[in-house]
Amino acid sequence: MQSFKYYAPTYVAFGRDTENRVAELVKKYGGTKVLLHYGGQSAIKSGLLPKVEKILSEAGIEYVKLGGVVPNPRLSMVRKGIEVCKQEGVDFLLAVGGGSVIDSCKAISSGRFYEGDVWTLYEHKDHATKYLPIGCILTIPAAGSETSDGSVITNDEVEGWLKKDYCVDEFRCKFAIMNPELTYTLPAWQTACGITDMMMHTMERYFSKDDDMEITDALAEALLRTCMQEGKKVLENPTDYNSRAQIMWAGSLAHNDLTGCGTSGDWATHCLEHELSGMFDVSHGAGLAAVWGSWARYTRGENMPRFARFAKNVMGVDTAGLIDLDAAEAGIQAMEQFFRSIGMPTNIHDLIGKEISDAEIADMADKCSTGDTHTVGGLKALCMADMVEIYKMAR
Ligand code: NZQ
Ligand code: ZN
């Protein structure tokens, strides 16, 4: 087992009506003037936002509102948020929404006291030293940003756009309020994208070269099986509290590093996907489903027994008598079949609704490898030429 650091400091308030604790938790973590950050319409329509405003006001906590965060959150919104925080003396960021709103808060947090351009941090050219604290009320289980150290932002100020991440422990939320009932209003598509994303967060850690972390593997396999089983139930009955709750908790456990302890992980599928959602503004979860099978077929030779184990322990394939290659292929097909069964695309054409061109593939591979100067992936280090091949396999 590889040495590891495990740091999951987020206070989780999970269950019905937990949003009622928002003022108490903001105060507990020192907030006196809050930036209330949210997305498009969902939190207003559901009544959550007005409810939060009332609770904050009644507790005597001042707040300013900044809505309009879109999926694949934009740098231009981050800049707006930083300005508002400076002008209004904000000392606490409260995200009401999903990964996009939380990630936007994280970027604002890092940019608030940073003297340079906040994008420099996402270019990995510098580190901020002071951050604003963040709390969240989660409304979509998916990205796992409520417990992760990451933030992914799309730079909408450059030609062709660029999506990049910045990961630091200071980005871990002080608290995450998670009421499964707040997810009842999610459309089936968003629910399915979320299930795919949390499964991929687990699989990116699972498919590594390390084979000696039984406890971590067993946790990961249980998490994946639960996502498939409860995911189906949730899609059939969107107001099934118990299934919504299993999925919501799975999303956090999938990305707080629990299933990464002792493994070196891979993350190439995420890197390949971020180029797709950066270029075509598609949902992150759907983009992952579109490329995963091609990535798996391209790289499985690096650790075939692990793909065979996945087939048996996660996908329930009867691998008796199969050579590892056949077992691996059966597992990959079963995973793709699951993705399709919940409405996810398993190729780029179905994802973007058109044939992707060679030039677009070349552009994505160029960005993903920063002009062929770095590789992605722990199972197999992919250079620009590998990326082109995988995108072509997935087209
Ligand atoms: O804007 P509104 O109207 O709120 O609608 C949102 C949005 O359109 C809607 N929604 C959210 N809660 C809802 C709801 N609709 C009805 N009822 C509710 N309760 O859902 C849509 C998607 O929301 P978004 O926040 O974009 O989804 P998600 O949580 O999947 O976040 C995706 C972003 O997170 C990044 C992705 O790249 C993407 O930009 N990621 C962040 C990570 C991290 N910080 O650790 C890791 C991930 O791998 C991922 O890259
Ligand atoms: Zn993800």
Image (cartoon, rainbow, N blue to C red):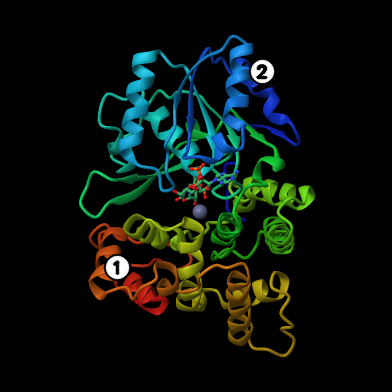
Residue at 40%, 13% in the rendered image: 89
Quadrant of the drawing holding the C terminus: bottom left
Q: Nearer the viewer, residue 41 or 263?
A: 41
In which image quadrant can residue 323 be found? bottom right
- Residue 31's x, y, as percent? 54, 16
- Residue 73's x, y, as percent? 40, 43
Seen in the image, is 173 located left or right of residue 377?
right
In which image quadrant can residue 77 be found? top left
Q: How many marks?
A: 2
- Residue 146's x, y, as percent? 57, 39
* Residue lying at the far left of the rendered structure: 159
Q: Amino acid at mark 1?
A: Met
Q: Amino acid at mark 2?
A: Glu
* Residue lying at the far front of the rendered structure: 45
In the rendered image, which residue does mark 2 sit on?
24
Residue at 67%, 29% in the rendered image: 19
* Residue lying at the far top of the rendered structure: 60
Q: Residues within 10 Å of mark 1 (few under 14, many from 20)?
A: many
- Residue 242's x, y, as percent? 79, 49
Q: Nearer the viewer, residue 253 or 161?
A: 161
* Residue lying at the far bottom of the rendered structure: 321
Instruction: Check mark 2 vs ligand 1: CB closer than 8 Å? yes or no.
Output: no
**Residue 113 in view, yes or no:** no
Say if 40 sits above or below 63 in the image.
Answer: below
Specify which label sits upstream in the sequence, 2 or 1: 2
Element carrying mark 2:
helix
- Measure the alpha-carbon separation of dots 2 and 1: 49 Å
Q: Which disc number belongs to residue 384? A: 1
Seen in the image, is 253 located left or right of residue 243?
left
Seen in the image, is 390 located left or right of residue 230?
left
